[in-house]
Image (spheres, rainbow, N blue to C red):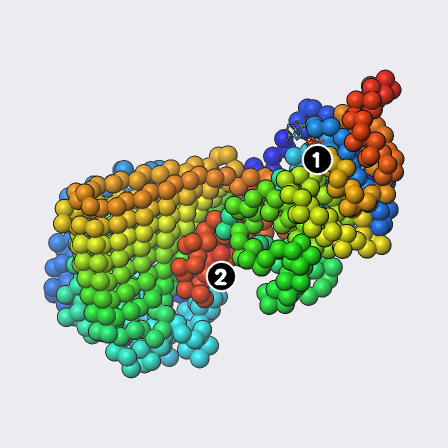
Amino acid sequence: MLKIENLTANVGDKQILKGISLSVNPGEVHAIMGPNGSGKSTLAQVIAGHPGYEVTGGTVTYEGQDLLDMDAEVRAQQGIFLAFQYPVEIPGVSNAYFLRAAYNEIRKARGEEEVDPMEFLDVMTERLKIVEMGDDMLQRSVNFGFSGGEKKRNEIFQMAVLEPKLAILDETDSGLDIDALRIVAEGVNKLKRPDRSTIVVTHYQRLLNYIVPDFVHVLAQGRIVRSGGKDLALELEERGYDWLLETAGASA
Amino acid sequence: MSSSIESLVNKEYQYGFVTDVESDAIPPGLSEETVRLISARKREPEWLLDWRLKAFRRWQAMTEPRWPNVKYKTIDYQAQTYYSAPRSVKPLQSLEEVDPELLKTYEKLGISLNEQKRLSGVAVDAIFDSVSVGTTMKAELKKHGVIFCSFGEAVLEHPELVQRYLGSVVPYSDNYFAALNSAVFSDGSFVYIPKGVRCPLELSTYFRINAADTGQFERTLIVADEGAYVSYLEGCTAPKRSTNQLHAAVVEIVSLDNAQVKYSTVQNWYAGDKDGVGGIYNFVTKRGKAFTNSKISWTQVETGSAITWKYPSVILQGDNSVGEFYSVAVVNNYQQADTGTKMIHIGKNTKSTIISKGISAGHGQNSYRGQVKVLGKASGARNYTQCDSMLIGNQCGAHTFPYIEIANNTATLEHEASTSKIGEDQIFYCKQRGLNTEHAISLIVAGFCKEVFKELPMEFALEAQQLLGVSLEGSVG
Ligand SMILES: Nc1ncnc2c1ncn2[C@@H]1O[C@H](COP(=O)(O)OP(=O)(O)OP(=O)(O)O)[C@@H](O)[C@H]1O
Ligand SMILES: [Mg+2]
């Protein structure tokens, strides 16, 4: 589904990603962990097509196509969804209106009919249940005045509505209380399908108790320094990152 | 960072065509003779000619205001043509007599003058250069005693009403452009709603400048008698031309005791090209006088014109009267706008609300200029002002000039202001959900303008939103 090879990327003159390779197959869940500032969000943003990052080398193939050649909106229309670490506020635009616009763009890209507000209300009402949110938030402005946790939950609600093929969750667990964490994680699990893949960026093993990864990767200083199964997360919880950084440093 | 908020491309202005009609114009230049000629063309009574001449003499003694925060080349008033009318238009003609070429023009602008095809619930007066080509739904309105016709027709058919109210809100001596308009005004709309009548249709006037080097000086007068209600909408477009054209209009609203007038504008005059060549100079005086318990509400969406100079205002004359001003002003490329309002509180317990949304893109300069004045006897006066600016890109500007004058210490005033920038992150967030850049911008801007759009009549809110999208197209590459 997604194949990243030797990807390097800059912000300004600063190289952040220093040669990332990663393969994600349909149905798989990959966790990406690593110290602050190691480049996890950068990787997520580069996959999603943020214009602020300049790809300087490597390739990314998505469903057989050159992903780096697509505009950000095309990537979204093709089924890539990023749950932002810092969701953006859009004052005056209701969640319902925003989501319907997104939903219809994605449908149009697939050659499907647009849905009217009434039909879409049914879609939203059903998906709200997945994240156990009240329908009052449909009329609120996108993320505007939302608490940190509400913003994160709203990202997963959007994901539930848009049903992406490849979802990247960037620290969706941070800022969530214990109950919300469980609800959100269960929501993500309910959306799992054999043809859908998930990349979960997190600092905490706790989330991975709910969303069980097939693979865990450790990103440090712009490189994947270790990959393993779900047990790697447990090991990191216990030992921290230092031992990996030393090995990485030695091999660099 | 490879900033995408930079490059500017101008989107084609879709109303920029010219209609080929033979017109009857008086020679360029401005003198007493010009004023007399215009008045004679319109077969006006003596009192109106006298009023025009007084205005003209007053104008000659005045100087063009320099305080607005806009820059433009000196206007040569002698090079303008002050009256131009399609030859085929006859005074007091009926809709059936309208030249098909003119009908086609309005069809092309999305305005059908064919009553059968019209959007139900709206009556239209269509003004082409200096004259009205027709007013729809007159018969229906007449049943309710509502008068809706061109100004010229009102002068001939309802002189007592015109004479009584003309200049009662905006005297000819009010300001430079109002004096000029009073001297040479050509056509515009006249509305009278009788006592206690709720006007059953939206009234709307569509202004079109067609002839080159011709100014449009329309004059609109709306009178809502006691307890009456009316909602009125004006729209405007002009051909694309590389020279600047002058538009100096006056709108007066009289809202008698317990009456309500809602006046909405979607201003889309030609704005000039992406280098700032051409476009309309829009110098407009709009003011309403609200008597006891009455309400006047201005809503404007200003997207066109090279220069906009305009302050729709309310004189809160009567006790408990209410004045509202909701404004969206967009400048892109080299457009400049200096717009806002004046709320003059005279009566007791008068209340005013000002919501202004300024959007600047390209090299556009947008100024909000607003005055809240509370006179000594206006005890219990209240004003709420909210003034927000949004910047798209780094080369545009937003400025605010609020003036407050209070002579009664029981007044309550609240003022809020904000400036924001459409961020790359906001646009990226939308794109990540599948919207393209233009869609993202129009969505973000529409959200920013929401409080104003919700004041527009339903049929026009969507149109205004689309227009906004078009005006900003290309503002982010
Ligand atoms: N827009 C930017 N401008 C300047 N530096 C940036 C920008 N975006 C990222 N960086 C830098 O790139 C590095 C990697 O940042 P990134 O956000 O990818 O880290 P992260 O692994 O997600 O960290 P965290 O765990 O704290 O979220 C950091 O040093 C950060 O300061
Ligand atoms: Mg991060």
Q: Is residue B51 left or right of residue A178?
A: left
Instruction: Reply above or below: B404 against B465.
Output: above
Residue B170 rendering spot, x and y as whole percentages: 20, 55
> Is residue A134 or residue B407 the one in the foreground?
A134
Number of marks present in the image shown: 2
Identify the disc placed on residue B462. Answer: 2
Labels 2 and 1 in the same subunit: no
Residue at (50, 34) in percent of width and height: B394
Instruction: Reply above or below: B44 against A173.
Output: below
Looking at the rendered structure, the kind of residue marked 1 is Ser
Instruction: Reply above or below: A207 against B248.
Output: above
Looking at the rendered structure, the kind of residue marked 2 is Leu
Residue at (83, 28) in percent of width and height: A225
Q: Is residue B262 visible?
A: yes
* Mark 2 residue crowding within 10 angstroms, few (<14) / some (14–19) / many (20+): few
Q: Is residue B319 left or right of residue B212?
A: left
Residue A240 rendering spot, x and y as whole percentages: 78, 26
- Residue B182, image quadrant: bottom left
- The residue that mark 1 highlights is A41
